[in-house]
Amino acid sequence: MRIDLNNAIAQQLAAEKNSTHKGGKPQPSPLPPEDKATFSNHGPSIHQLVQSALHPSTVRQERIAALRDAVNSGTYSVDADAAANAMIRESSGN
């Protein structure tokens, strides 16, 4: 396979030539569309998020501890049907 750099250079020069107007000065490029961002106070505050991260629920901690013990002891097993059904429910939005 042959790489033709002359063609690429010719295309670049043609593009530069087309981007200048009669005075020989480059035309200003058009401005990109303006980005906008809005903030709302409908969600939980940062403070609430930090507190929930620092103090997780005890029910969840107990569940995590039970799963950790089962994995460490080698008794943890996955119900393939339950996992598949959960994935299907999740993907269908139910």
Image (cartoon, helix red, strand yellow):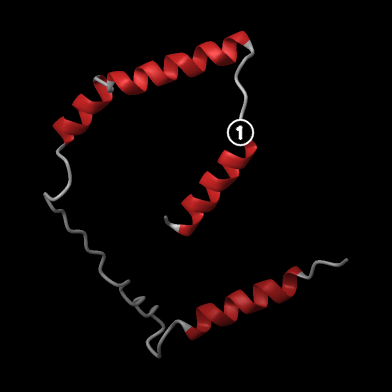
Quadrant of the image containing the N terminus: bottom right
* x then y, percent, for residue 50: 21, 28
Quadrant of the image containing the C terminus: bottom left
* x then y, percent, for residue 92: 48, 58
Residue drawn at point x = 57 percent, y = 40 percent: 83
The quadrant in which residue 4 appears is bottom right
Q: Check the image and report above or below for 21 versus 61.
A: below
Q: What residue type is labelled 1?
A: Asp
The quadrant in which residue 78 appears is top right
* x then y, percent, for residue 7: 72, 76
Q: Is residue 24 left or right of residue 43?
A: right
* x then y, percent, for residue 14: 58, 82
Number of marks present in the image shown? 1
Residue drawn at point x = 14 percent, y = 38 percent: 45
**Closer to us: 35 or 15:** 35
Q: Check the image and report above or below for 20 versus 83.
A: below
* The residue positioned farthest toward the bottom in the image shown: 22
Q: In this view, does 16 lie to the left or right of 38?
A: right
**Closer to us: 45 or 28:** 45
* The residue positioned farthest toward the left in the image shown: 41
Q: Check the image and report above or below for 3 versus 17.
A: above
Residue drawn at point x = 37 percent, y = 87 percent: 23
Residue under numbered circle 1: 79
